[in-house]
Amino acid sequence: MRLQEEKHRFVVADLLLLVTALVWGFGFVAQRAGMEYVGPFTFNGIRFLLGGICLLPAIWRTDQTMSKEIAAAVPSVKAGFWAGCLLFLGASLQQVGLLYTSAGKAGFITGLYVIFVPIFGLVLGQRTSCGTWLGALLATVGMYFLSVRADFTIDAGDLFVLAGAWFWALHVLLLGYLSPRTHPVRLAMVQFFFCGFFSLIVALCFEVISLQTIQAAAIPILYGGLCSVGVGYTLQTVAQRWAHPAHASILLSLEAVFAAVGGWWLLGETLSGRGLFGCALMLVGMLFSQLYPLLNRKRLSGVHELR
């Protein structure tokens, strides 16, 4: 009976992660559609503030069970400020890049952060497997086919999104350090508020903000804030309590595929055969870099059993 319950939980967790990848993938479509009416910093400012507000009920619930010792190790405001700075840089570069590139391409290029994370971890003394390097090589070749044209030029939007992926990777590493030392949901909320605040400051300086344009972009903004930030984070948090890490990484990588499907379906975006080949290589590279440690452990355990 207990085994059946655990299997049920794993299935539910995988489904929740699949829905999370779907929500995040279509978030790229909302981000691109919203900028038909408002600037990138206005869009990010409002959606991240909405996302932070979404987490207020979760804060109250987790406060009942969170260990006071863990929650007090690093103050949430201090942790949220630094995480919010990296989040602001990654989200801003991605959002500006979407002005000049497609939602599908942005989804695949952003997904490279799963390879950048272990590579950046070398600076912190973390070990990086050869699987990560092979995955990075495949993904790099894939990005060449996806973004670099026959005349060896590349869209500025792709470069912005690529730079954003570097900051997403740094953000993941910082959260890996901060999450065990502070209240994780409060950390998420505070970083969203800081990111939204920084974005609105830049928007007030460089963009024209009006109630009319915000109303015109209401649906993409609401999707980006309530679904991508609020619902997506909550589903991921719940699912990863039960999901196997390998399953989680694979399913969340499908975010890039959903971004491409959403861009084709809702925005009429298309990719050439060369671009599709590049996307396939990038997806294989991302998956290989995440699956290699698991496959290697299974191989080594098999060798030990034979001995």
Image (spheres, rainbow, N blue to C red):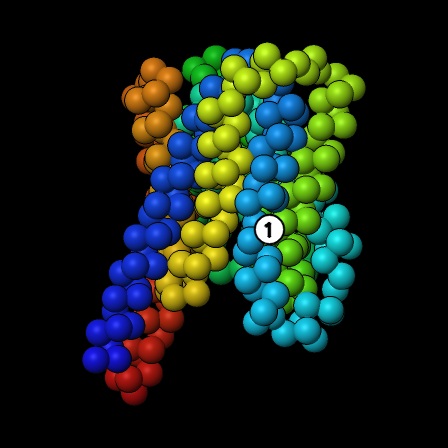
- At 26% from the left and 84% from the top, the residue drawn is 306
The quadrant the C terminus occupies is bottom left
User: Residue 296: x percent and y percent?
Assistant: 37, 66
- At 40% from the left and 46% from the top, the residue drawn is 20
The quadrant the N terminus occupies is bottom left
Q: Is residue 161 visible?
A: yes
Could you tell me the amino acid type at mark 1? Answer: Leu
* Left or right, residue 99 beside residue 5: right
Q: Which type of secondary structure does the marked residue at label 1 adopt?
A: helix
User: Residue 94: x percent and y percent?
Assistant: 57, 30
Please tell me whether residue 140 is drawn above or below residue 14 in the rendered image: above
* Residue where numbered disc 1 is placed: 56
User: Residue 12: x percent and y percent?
Assistant: 30, 59
* Left or right, residue 149 beside residue 194: left
- At 40% from the left and 32% from the top, the residue drawn is 26
Q: Quadrant of residue 194?
A: top right
Please tell me whether residue 246 is drawn above or below residue 162 in the rendered image: below
Q: Nearer the viewer, residue 162 or 305?
A: 162
User: Residue 90: x percent and y percent?
Assistant: 62, 37
Please tell me whether residue 233 is drawn above or below residue 238 in the rendered image: above
Q: Quadrant of residue 159?
A: top right
Q: Is residue 275 visible?
A: no
Q: Count the numbered circles shown.
A: 1
Furthest toward the bottom, the residue is 307
Q: Quadrant of residue 5?
A: bottom left
Please tell me whether residue 268 is drawn above or below residue 94 in the rendered image: above
- At 77% from the left and 54% from the top, the residue drawn is 78
